[in-house]
Each structure stands twice: as C-alpha cells, then as structure tokens.
C-alpha cells in the first residue's frame, strides 16, 4: 500500500471532563503506533478542524462538538474515510443511543424519553419508576449534572426542570438497575476487549459509580459481555468504543452507557496497537471498494 497520510483530530477539552490528559494520551499513543507502521499523522485540535481546511482523505478523530460532528458527516458523505464515523459519534448521544439499542434488541434499562418543559410525575408513577437516572438526551455529557441519580419521582421532576432552565430540551430517564457495575473497552475487527469493576479500581469521572458500589463478584458470561458490546458497536457504527453495563444478581447483562472513543485509561498501552490496526484495516477495506 502507498504511504498513508492521516489527519488526527483531538477532542476539545470541554468534552473531556476530568479526562483531558487521558484522552490526549490514548490519541497520541495511537498516532505513534500508526507512525511506526509507516503512516504520516498530522495532528489538529478540534478548533483547527472547525476553522480550517483539513485536506487529508483519512480522518481519525475524537470529536464531540456538534459542529465538528456535522462536518465529519459531510466529509464522509463526500468520500473521506472517517474513524469514528460522525454518524456513529452522533448515535452515542443519549436519545439516539437509547432508541437504537432498544430497537436492536440489546438489553438496556427501561426508559422514558421526555421533553424537559413537561411534567413527568404521572409518566414515572405509571411506569413504576422510583430510583432512576436522568441524562441529557440531546448530546454527550459535559458536566456532572448532565447525568443525575434520583430516588423518587418528585426529585426526578426537579432535575428535569433544572435541565429545562439550563436550555436542555430533551432528557432520557433510565430505570436504575441493581447489580455489579462493569466498565468495558473494545475495538472492532481486533481481538482487543477489556473490562473491569470501576468502583473497585477507584476509576471515576463524576463519582456516580458509588451508587452501585463495590462489586459483589456476580458470575456472568465474559463471552456474552463481549458479544453484546460488539453488537452494540456495530448497530451504533462506532469502531473504537467503551461504556458501562450492569450485571444483574441473576447474571444478566444490560448496557447502560456507550461511548465513542473513550480514554482507555486502565488499558491504554494494550489498546493503542489494536486501535491502530483497526484504523488501517478500515482504510484498506475502503480503498479496495
């Protein structure tokens, strides 16, 4: 294959809450691995990408800004190779993710999608929701308050009203699932898959892991976990992914969050070569078409 030139677009700091260093570290590690394989990798900030002209035909990115996502989608439609796809990144916003995972038959908490200017008390009570999670539906979380745990319907209504006052028009309300919280990372078209208990490891972005607390070591199928996560990555169109799931007391697995290109913080060194391999495999597949 001829020499490959890649534009690498880093994630804006506003979209790396409490993880700016970790996000930069995995991105730079992947860029180094691509260079070792003979690629030229030119690094740009998300701001440079938005305000300038990136000419490279291959764009590897961690973008989260909505304008960046739409620009990536336009370039993809024009024939550029984009990893992760701008469409996949948008699919990981809460409302779209909820609709796609549920519609694809992937285990996911019972959920309500609501307008934040509406009263949600009746809907929550009729659905039997008590403990639940409220998440902004329109976009990725940027602040701790974008994901809120509540203990009853009245508290949920207060949070929904706060979202409205903050200018967030839609929210997803997930029923709280009891069980072990597991965090996972994966890379399509490679053997790489990593999981761990984040609370036990002291790994946290906002401290929400404390709600489920220390793992109980519930038995579950590791092969089934990987299978479910891989399926989710395919339907969401995200090659480089991570997220969270709950293992129920019965050992059932439900995804509760799915992210495009997370930090891979606890497994960065192991993941980076596989991410580079995934990128090159995607480039080869596209150029053969």
Image (cartoon, helix red, strand yellow):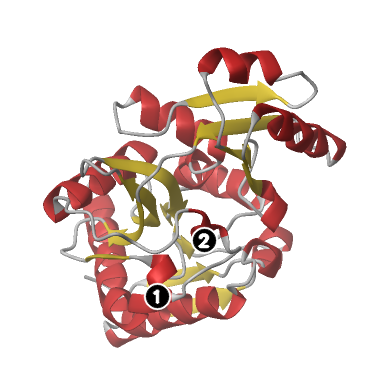
Question: Residue at the spot x=49%, y=43% of the render?
Answer: 92
Against 22, residue 229 (above or below) is: above
Is 38 or 164 nearer to us in this picture? Answer: 164
Dot 2: element:
helix
Residue 78 visible, this orientation = no
In percent of width and height, residue 165 lies at 87, 37
- Above or below, 72 against 38 in this view is above
Single out the mark in the foreground, 2 or 1: 2
- Give the residue at mark 1: 201
Question: 21 or 214: nearer the eye?
Answer: 214
- Helix, strand or loop under label 1: helix
> Reading the chain from its start, which is encountered first: label 2 or label 1?
1
* Numbered mark located on residue 148 in the image: none
Q: Is residue 1 above or below residue 117?
A: below
**In the rendered image, which residue does mark 2 sit on?**
210
| Residue 166: image location, x then y, percent | 84, 42
Q: CA distance from mark 2 to mark 1?
A: 12 Å
Residue sitting at x 18%, y 62%: 190
Name the residue nearer the viewer: 282 or 57: 282
Asked if residue 204 shows in the view, the reply is yes
- From the image, which quarter does the C terminus lie in? top left
Evaluate if marks 2 and 1 touch, with contact meaning CB atoms under 8 Å apart: no
In the rendered view, does 166 fall on the left or right side of 152? right
Q: Residue 102 occupies which quadrant of the picture?
A: top left
**Residue displayed at 50% across by 47% down:** 89
187 or 210, which is in the foreground? Answer: 210
In this image, 176 relative to 36: left or right? right
Name the image quarter holding residue 191.
Answer: bottom left
Quadrant where the N terminus sits is: bottom left
* Residue drawn at x 33%, y 77% as measured from the top left: 267
């Amino acid at each position: 294959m001829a020499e490959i030139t890649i534009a690498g677009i880093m994630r804006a700091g506003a979209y790396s809450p409490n993880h700016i260093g970790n996000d930069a570290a995995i991105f730079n590690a992947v860029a180094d691995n691509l260079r070792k394989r003979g690629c030229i990798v030119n690094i740009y900030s998300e701001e440079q990408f938005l305000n300038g002209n990136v000419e490279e035909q291959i764009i590897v990115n961690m973008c989260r800004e909505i304008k960046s996502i739409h620009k990536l989608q336009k370039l993809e439609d024009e024939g550029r190779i984009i990893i992760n796809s701008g469409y996949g990144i948008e699919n990981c916003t809460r409302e779209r993710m909820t609709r796609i995972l549920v519609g694809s038959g992937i285990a996911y908490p019972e959920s309500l999608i609501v307008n934040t200017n509406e009263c949600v008390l009746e809907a929550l009570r009729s659905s039997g929701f008590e403990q639940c999670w409220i998440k902004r539906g329109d976009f990725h979380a940027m602040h701790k308050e974008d994901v809120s745990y509540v203990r009853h319907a009245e508290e949920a209504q207060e949070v929904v009203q706060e979202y409205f006052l903050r200018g967030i028009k839609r929210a997803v309300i997930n029923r709280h699932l009891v069980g072990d919280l597991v965090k996972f990372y994966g890379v399509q078209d490679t053997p790489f898959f990593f999981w761990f208990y984040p609370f036990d490891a002291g790994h946290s972005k906002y401290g929400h892991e404390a709600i489920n607390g220390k793992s109980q070591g519930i038995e579950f199928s590791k092969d089934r976990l990987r299978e479910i996560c891989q399926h989710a990555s395919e339907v969401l169109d995200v090659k480089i992914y991570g997220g969270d799931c709950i293992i129920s007391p019965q050992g059932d697995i439900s995804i509760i969050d799915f992210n495009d290109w997370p930090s891979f913080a606890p497994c960065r060194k192991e993941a980076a070569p596989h991410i580079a391999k995934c990128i090159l495999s995607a480039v080869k597949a596209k150029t053969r078409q």
